[in-house]
Structures are given as C-alpha cells and as structure tokens.
C-alpha cells in the first residue's frame, strides 16, 4: 500500500527515507502556512500507523513544525536527538493490545521518549483494540483535541 515513506518489512522502517520524507513534510507545512496565512506553530499532527510514525518523526526532527500530535497505533521510529526539547507539547498516543503490527511496548517506548524530552503525553491503551481505528479512538481523539487550549468549541 502507498505510505508516507518506505519500509523494509513490517515493523522495519527505512530510516533514511523516513528522515527525507519528514523534512519534505516539514517544508510543505511551512510553505502552506506562508501561502494560506496560518501559524505553523498551531498545527496538530494526526496520524494512524505510518501517518503516526511520520508525525512522531516530525516532532523529533523538526519540533517547531507541529504544536503537538495525535499518534494512533504508533511505534518508536528511531531514537530522538539527545538535545530534543518538546517543552510541554501535547501528544495523545493510542495503542491496542491486539495490534498485530505494533506491539504495545513499541508505543510505550515512544511515550517514554516523548515524556523524557518534555512532551505532555496522554497514553490510551485499549487491550481489545487491534491496528485499525474504532469508534472509541475517534471519540478519544475528538475529546482530546477539544480540550486543547484555544480549540474551537
């Protein structure tokens, strides 16, 4: 299936390609902000699976490109730089206990890295959830986004 970046196998990402595509996405966000007159620092990334992985990569490589992120069924794509400062960036991570592609431990490793670099993380674990989205994921995401400071009510 088409993805945001190449992978070598299930659970094995092509890190050089991921980094290149992450930089392209950050440049796209900056160009769109300039063209359409919005503040890029207010953008919240939202992704499922590989979309979540590239959003996590954006937080790691270009922390100013996103204000925060919703990461659904993510894995830790790679270790972030030691000097990364996410300074309270809000992040929602949702993991499933029956996810056949991303074990919960992978999402938990990502949560530890995000928190260790200053992000304000809310971790949701559903032991019955697989890799796909369920209604609970959508409701959780909606509620989380609505609770962000400055969110439209």
Image: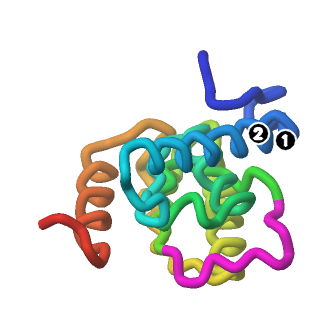
105 horizontally vs 140: left or right = right
The C terminus sits in image quarter = bottom left
The relative height of residue 105 versus residue 28 in the rendered view (above or below) is below
Nearer to us in this view, 109 or 6: 6
User: Of all residues shown, which one is farthest toward the top?
Assistant: 1
Percent x, y for residue 38? 37, 55
Residue at x-position 47% and y-position 42%: 32
Residue at x-position 70% and y-position 79%: 85
125 horizontally vs 144: left or right = right
Label 1: element kind? helix
The N terminus sits in image quarter = top right
How busy is the neighbourhood of tag 1: few (under 14 within 10 Å), some, or many (20 plus)? some
The answer to whether residue 136 is magenta is no
Q: Are marks 2 and 1 in contact (CB under 8 Å)?
A: yes
Residue at x-position 25% and y-position 45%: 135
Residue hosting label 1: 15
The answer to whether residue 80 is magenta is yes
87 horizontally vs 112: left or right = left
Marker disc for residue 18 = 2
Percent x, y for residue 34? 47, 49
Nearer to us in this view, 81 or 39: 39
- Residue 68 visible within the image: no
Residue 124 occupies quadrant: bottom left
Nearer to us in this view, 35 or 89: 35
The relative height of residue 33 versus residue 107 in the rendered view (above or below) is above
Give the residues in magenta. 79-89
Marks 2 and 1, how far apart at CA: 5 Å
- Residue 141 visible within the image: yes
Label 2: element kind? helix
């Amino acid at each position: 299936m088409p993805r945001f970046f190449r992978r070598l196998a299930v659970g094995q990402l092509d890190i050089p390609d991921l980094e290149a595509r992450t930089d392209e996405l950050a440049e796209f966000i900056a160009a769109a902000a300039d063209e359409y007159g919005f503040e890029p620092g207010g953008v919240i990334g939202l992704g499922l699976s590989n979309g979540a992985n590239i959003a996590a990569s954006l937080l790691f490589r270009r922390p100013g490109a996103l204000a925060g992120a919703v990461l659904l069924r993510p894995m830790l794509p790679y270790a972030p730089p030691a000097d990364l400062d996410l300074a309270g960036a809000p992040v929602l991570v949702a993991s499933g206990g029956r996810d056949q592609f991303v074990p919960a431990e992978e999402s938990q490793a990502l949560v530890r890295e995000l928190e260790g670099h200053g992000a304000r993380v809310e971790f949701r674990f559903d032991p019955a959830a697989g890799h796909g989205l369920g209604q609970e994921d959508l409701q959780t995401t909606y509620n989380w986004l609505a609770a962000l400071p400055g969110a439209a009510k």
